[in-house]
Image (spheres, helix red, strand yellow):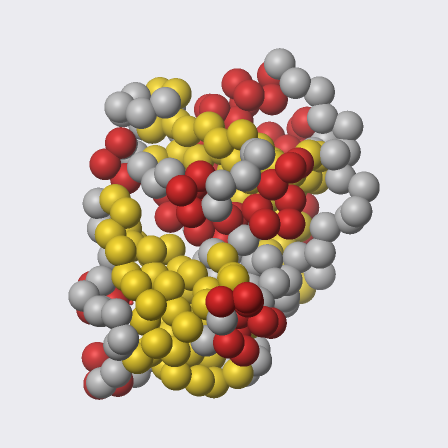
Amino acid sequence: MSVLDAKVVFNKCLAKEIYFLLLKAKEVSLKAKPGQFVMLKLYPDRLAFLRRPFSICLSLPEKDIFAILYTIKGKVTQSMSSLNTGATISVVGPLGNPLKLPENISDLILIGGGIGIAPLISFLPMYHEKAHFIAGFRSSEDYIDVKEIFPGTYEYIVATEDGSKGYKGTSLDLFRQYTKSRVFNNAIVISCGPLAMLKKLSKICAQAKLTCYVFLETHMACGMGLCQGCVVKTKQGYKRVCKDGPIFSAEEICWEEIRD
Ligand SMILES: Cc1cc2nc3c(=O)[nH]c(=O)nc-3n(C[C@H](O)[C@H](O)[C@H](O)COP(=O)(O)OP(=O)(O)OC[C@H]3O[C@@H](n4cnc5c(N)ncnc54)[C@H](O)[C@@H]3O)c2cc1C
Ligand code: FES
């Protein structure tokens, strides 16, 4: 884990209120593993007392850069959207427990709801040949072409709630449809999105006997296991999302304790 200043390489708007931020930070790009995140602080830091967590969606160590895909939520992300090339951001990371997948997996099914696609992209450089990427957006206005961020041999299929792009429905509707006509021998599902979606998905996967991992995005203060501000109840007791996660086996989460 490093604390450093990173330079903005570019900060591009890809869809309605969704931006792709490339940051130059050699140490982070060298150390980042799929599923990890960084805590960011903008300058001047009077804007917000606490750093904000963002998944490392892609890391290019040969260029000393890593990428973040973010949506505007509040004051920090609003301010991030106007950062220009050459600006400086304070970065702590990489943080979190990376997920190491077994070597013998046959298929990797990535299911993203909205901006939940961001951390899933980090698995593509290593697993794109085995990956099926299912993404759900509200409408074509929010649509992100993941193939533009990481081209590869994986299938990228999209659902929108209003049917303005791809399948009409949610990413879970599309997942059910997609898996109906296919047999997966040793597949792993990884998902990130709203809690209600993750809760439903964990039920579907349990019924279909599919191994499922979920990214949890709780509010975080320290991001490194010190404040207990991000705990989630699991079958083995309370765990810190920042230090023990952010990826958990869907089976270990006490879903009934989590408010949607
Ligand atoms: C491990 C992790 C990885 C993340 N990765 C990404 C990412 O790749 N891209 C991305 O766009 N966002 C990501 N987030 C969420 C991101 O941290 C928040 O959107 C950001 O902190 C909002 O800051 P803000 O100052 O703009 O909004 P604030 O002013 O802090 O909040 C605005 C609104 O958003 C809500 N909010 C803030 N943080 C969260 C959260 N973590 N979960 C649910 N609601 C929240 C607040 O309750 C409030 O209603 C991640 C969060 C975690 C914990
Ligand atoms: S944010 Fe402090 S322990 Fe997780």
The image position of residue 121, as x and y in percent, is: 50, 48
Q: Residue at x 21, y 45 (%)?
A: 16
The image quadrant of residue 141 is: top left
Q: Residue at x 36, y 22 (%)?
A: 166
Looking at this view, name the residue that lies furthest to the top.
Answer: 181
Q: Is residue 185 visible?
A: yes
Q: Between 136 and 68, which is closer to the camera in this rendering? A: 68
Looking at this view, name the residue that lies furthest to the right.
Answer: 104
- The N terminus lies in quadrant: bottom right
The image position of residue 202, as x and y in percent, is: 59, 39
Q: Is residue 198 visible?
A: no
Q: Residue at x 49, y 67 (%)?
A: 63
The image position of residue 92, as x and y in percent, is: 46, 79
Q: Taking 224 as reference, is 54 left or right?
A: left
Q: Is residue 96 above or below residue 113?
A: below
Q: Is residue 216 above or below residue 9?
A: above
Q: Between 143 and 24, which is closer to the camera in this rendering? A: 24
Query: Disc count in the image?
Result: 0
Q: Is residue 46 above or below residue 143?
A: below
Looking at this view, name the residue that lies furthest to the front.
Answer: 62
Q: Is residue 88 above or below residue 150?
A: below
Q: Taking 16 as reference, is 207 left or right?
A: right
Q: Taking 34 as reference, is 119 left or right?
A: left
The image quadrant of residue 184 is: top right
The image quadrant of residue 137 is: top left
Q: Residue at x 47, y 85 (%)?
A: 3
The image position of residue 256, as x and y in percent, is: 55, 47
